[in-house]
Amino acid sequence: QVQLVESGGGLVQAGGSLRLSCAASGRIFSINTMGWHRQAPGKQRELVATITKDGNTNYADAVKDRFTISRDNGKNTVNLQMNSRKPEDTAVYYCYAPAVRTTPVEFLEVWGQGTLVTVSS
């Protein structure tokens, strides 16, 4: 069993900053890609950013140049620094690992429970 636990959500004013963190725990052999998705009220869940174990990053156009994803491979944690927040960034943010290797030959897709981020105008 593998768990992803997010922290750092809350209320922030437009233009402000917030940092989300996510820690993976459990039976983990290795994790290549980790990332964040978000789901705004009434909308579908969408990709925010991903990062590989080698540090390669990918961002949604809506957050490029404002958000920065980083990770600590030794601690199996991933962070999302969100700057210049906009009201449209209001959403539940989910930590995500599409293929956690639990044994040399077994993989598991894992999602966190989500953390609410609200940006007030």
Image (cartoon, rainbow, N blue to C red):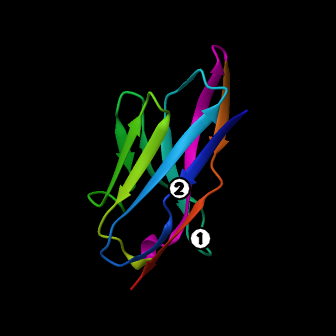
Q: Mark 1 — residue?
A: 43
Range of the magenta residues? 88-105
Front residue of this view, candidates 19 and 66: 19
Q: Quadrant of residue 86?
A: bottom left
Amino acid type at image mark 2: Ser
* Relative side of 1 to 46, left or right: right
Say how many tags the image has: 2
Q: Mark 2 — residue?
A: 7
Q: Where residue 8 sits: x, y (%)?
A: 48, 59
Amino acid type at image mark 1: Lys
Query: Under tag 2, what secondary structure?
Result: strand
At a point 32% along the width and 72% down the height, the residue shown is 16
Mark pair 2, 1: CA separation: 22 Å
Q: Where residue 23 sits: x, y (%)?
A: 54, 42
At a point 36% along the width and 43% down the height, the residue shown is 70
Secondary structure mostly seen in magenta is strand
Looking at this rendering, what residue extends furthest in the right direction? 1
Q: Is residue 98 magenta?
A: yes
At a point 53% along the width and 69% down the height, the residue shown is 91
Front residue of this view, candidates 108 and 81: 81
Looking at this rendering, what residue extends furthest in the bottom direction? 121
Quadrant (top left/top right/bottom left/bottom right) for the N terminus: top right
- Mark 2 residue crowding within 10 angstroms, few (<14) / some (14–19) / many (20+): some
Query: Under tag 1, what secondary structure?
Result: loop
